[in-house]
Every structure is written in C-alpha cells, then in structure tokens.
Image: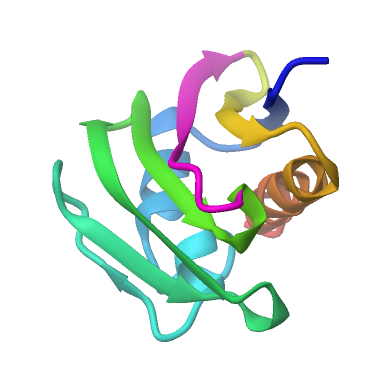
Amino acid sequence: MSKTLTVNVKRVIAGAPAKVYEAWMDPKQACNPWSYGKPASMEAKVGKPFFMVMGSAGAHFGRILKLLKGKQLQFTWMSRYTRGLESTVTVDFKKHAAGTLMTLRHTGLPNDSFGRAHIAGWGDFLGMMEGHFARK
C-alpha cells in the first residue's frame, strides 16, 4: 500500500471559468474553503501564506504556489488531517458545454482515514460551488 494518497474531485459548474475562479478565490462568497475558515488570512498572491480554523477540523494553512486567473490555482495544504505533511492542491477551471469543468487534485495526503476524509471535504466544497451557481 502506498504511503500517500491522491484525491480527485470533479464538478460541472453552471458558470464561465473566469466567474467560477473568482467565486472560488473570494473569501466573501460562501462556496469555498476561504469563506468557511475563520479567522481567515488569505491574500491571493503567489508565495503568500494563508491560515484558517475550520470548525472542529481545526487549523489549516499553506501557501499559494500558482495563480492563472480563470484557469488554475495551486496551493499547499497542511492540517492535522495531513498529519503535518505538506500536501498540494491543484484546481483547474476548463470551459465545458454546461459552463465550467472544475477539477480538484490533492496530492501527498497520508493514505489513511485522515487523508481519505479529504474526499468528502473537497466534494462538499465543490458541491457548494455547484449550488452557488445553480442559484444564480
């Protein structure tokens, strides 16, 4: 059994890639991890760190690695659920007939129940994004 796990989550969002990207990056929109955590410290610039406390899941932090507006973002992700490992999250926003295909890939997670908890966690956030645009 591999020591690390990769999580892949996809959703088709009923909005243009640029709009979906903007909503994902805006902590004022209740459809992304930055809005869920508090107090959230997040500046959307490459190299900048972020920090948030996500309810009973505790502190989550990392740094922004890549920002390609409307196309892709990449950041590191650490919490007790990564067992202190610095994992990497890449989110792609691609044009789709019904709006945007949003694909989240989280690599370097521990291959245990803590790492597998990210499957539901990221699925919830992409589901929130899907619901956010379905209401528009």
| Residue 17 sits in quarter | top left
State whether residue 75 is above or below residue 127. above
Judge from the rendering whether residue 46 lies leftward or rightward of residue 24; answer left or right.
left
- Residue 100 position, x and y percent, is 57, 26
Quarter holding the C terminus is: bottom right
Judge from the rendering whether residue 127 lies leftward or rightward of residue 26; answer left or right.
right
Residue 94 counted in the magenta span: yes
Instruction: Choose between 90 and 110: the one closer to the eye.
Output: 110
State whether residue 125 is above or below residue 38. above
- Residue 134 position, x and y percent, is 72, 50
Span highlighted in magenta in the image: 83-96
Quarter holding the N terminus is: top right
Name the magenta segment's main secondary structure.
strand
| Residue 68 sits in quarter | top left
Judge from the rendering whether residue 120 lies leftward or rightward of residue 8; answer left or right.
right
- Residue 85 position, x and y percent, is 50, 43
What residue appears at the point 44 percent right and 53 percent down from the top-left corner? 23
What residue appears at the point 36 percent right and 69 percent down from the top-left corner? 51
State whether residue 76 is above or below residue 11. below
Residue 113 counted in the magenta span: no
Instruction: Choose between 131 and 121: the one closer to the eye.
Output: 121
Scheme of image coloration: rainbow
- Total marks shown come to 0
- Residue 46 position, x and y percent, is 15, 41
What residue appears at the point 47 percent right and 23 percent down from the top-left corner? 92
State whether residue 128 is above or below residue 47. below
What residue appears at the point 37 percent right and 53 percent down from the top-left corner? 25
Instruction: Choose between 121 and 130: the one closer to the eye.
Output: 121
Instruction: Choose between 100 and 113: the one closer to the eye.
Output: 113
